[in-house]
Structure formats: C-alpha cells, structure tokens
Amino acid sequence: MLELKNIKKYYKMGNENVVKALDDVSLTVGDGEFVAIIGPSGSGKSTLMNIIGCLDIATEGDYLVDGVSISAFKENQLAHLRNKKMGFIFQGFNLLSKLDAFENVELPLIYQGMRKSQRKQAVLQALKSVGMADRVHHKPTELSGGQQQRVAIARALATRPSVVLADEPTGNLDSKTGEEVMQILKNLNDQGTTVILITHDADVASHAKRIVKIHDGKVTEDRANDCDQVTREEV
Ligand SMILES: Nc1ncnc2c1ncn2[C@@H]1O[C@H](COP(=O)(O)OP(=O)(O)OP(=O)(O)O)[C@@H](O)[C@H]1O
Ligand SMILES: [Mg+2]
C-alpha cells in the first residue's frame, strides 16, 4: 500500500522564484491496483513518479510505504526500499549501451546480491516473459525500439517488484508496439503486481483500471475506469 499525504514538491529557482511541481497531492494506491496518472506536459507526473518510486523526497507532506513513513529515510535506506519493492520503466528505455540484453537485466540482481547461478535463471525467465529469449546477447543498438523496451521491462521485472512504475513507456514506440507493451503491463497486473503508469495519452491510460488526472501539480480527478465493463454490457 502506497499512501501520499498532502505531498508538496517545490523547486527553488534563484531567489524568489519557486516552481510548485506538486501542490498538496494526496493519493492512496492499494496492492494490485493498475493506475494511470495522466496530465499535460509539465503537470508534475514525473515528479510524482519519482516520489512514489522513492527516487526523490517531497518538500512537505508524508509518504507511507506499507505503513512506514519514509520522509526521514536516508539515501541508503531509500535505495534498499527501491531495490526490494520497485521496478522502473522509462520512455527512453535507459539501457546501458555496452551491455547486452542479459547483462542489462542482470544488473539490478547483482545490486540485490543474488548469487550467479540464481541470477542466470532469473534473467532468462524475465527475458522469456517479455518474448525476448532469442535476443539474449544483443546489445541495445542491435535491437528495435520495441525490443529495447521489452528488455527494459524484463530488467524491471527480474527483481520481482511488488510495484512497477512506468513513465511514458510507450512514448517512443509505434502504436502496435505500444499495444504489446501495454499487454505485458496488463499481464503483470493480472499476476498481482501493482502497476502505476504515467502518460499524457488518454488511449494509453484507458488500459488502466483507475485514472488519476493531474494538472498544475494538483489531482483534479480520480476515478475507476470501467471501459471494459461498458464494452461487455454493449455486447
Ligand atoms: N529539477 C527541477 N528543477 C526545477 N524545476 C523542475 C525540476 N523538475 C521539474 N521541474 C518543473 O516541475 C514541473 C513538473 O515537471 P514534471 O517533469 O514532473 O512534468 P511532467 O508532467 O512529467 O511533464 P512531461 O509530460 O513533459 O514529462 C515543470 O514545470 C518543470 O519545469
Ligand atoms: Mg515527465
């Protein structure tokens, strides 16, 4: 369970100028939810994702992860929590260009301290789960955009996180490949993983079960997304 309570994130720019990237955001995400956070450019989506993912700390307000307030956590405690609980997928894939698919997926497992024999099994399973078992030794430049994103997803999954945070995961992909990536996230959610998807695209957001809208650093709407149900009733 993730609980944001009156979260504010301010950036000081020079003497007087303050950017209110997040302005009093309260949001609770339960285990196993699939939430899309949607809003225009500059509305605070990535800032929110960084705070939810424990990559950054709020200026004000409290954030509880499974009931524990992390506001006073030191960087090493945050890193430990991230490693244990969170998986990240970014628009730009963020793969290391000198490493092949296997090595990219292996990296967070090395940080976790997993033994080599166990790592091999976990990496191959993660790559297989995203349909990349036949590209294990390809480097990022030897893969298509969609394939790179699937490797990045495998890297996020390999540690078996309970929460996956995806910031515009389909932003650099054509619509068909984007659909495939969304399908992988849906399957992951069906298996019980909490998925938090950040997007400015309403079509992409429509895959989620809950839609939270953000504007100028404030939550303006928070609703269940019952599109699936409507379609079923129509049929
Ligand atoms: N490190 C920073 N220093 C100062 N201002 C920042 C910083 N990071 C973000 N901002 C500002 O905070 C606001 C929110 O930025 P954020 O990156 O969260 O937006 P976003 O919703 O993710 O936008 P996009 O859809 O373009 O990725 C923006 O106005 C931005 O200029
Ligand atoms: Mg962003």
Image (cartoon, rainbow, N blue to C red):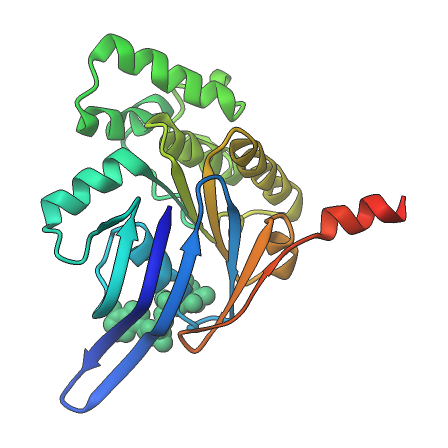
Image location of residue 218, percent across then percent down = 43, 74
What quarter of the picture does the C terminus occupy?
top right
Image coordinates of residue 119 in percent, x first then y, are 28, 16
Ligand 1 image position (quadrant): bottom left
Residue 213 in view, yes or no: yes
Is residue 202 depicted above or below 179 in this figure?
below
Percent position (x, y) of residue 198?
A: 47, 56
Residue 11 lies left or right of residue 41; in this view the side is: left
Nearest the viewer among 127 and 82 is 82
Residue 97 seen in the current view? no
Question: 126 left or right of 228?
Answer: left
Residue shown at 57% from the left, 54% from the top: 210
Where 62 falls versus 127 (above or below)?
Answer: below
Farthest residue, direction bottom:
16
Q: Position of residue 145 (x, y in %)?
A: 50, 40
Check the image and name the residue furthest to the right: 235
Instruction: Identify the residue at horizontal 61%, vertical 36% (top origin).
Output: 183
Residue located at (79% from left, 51% from top): 230
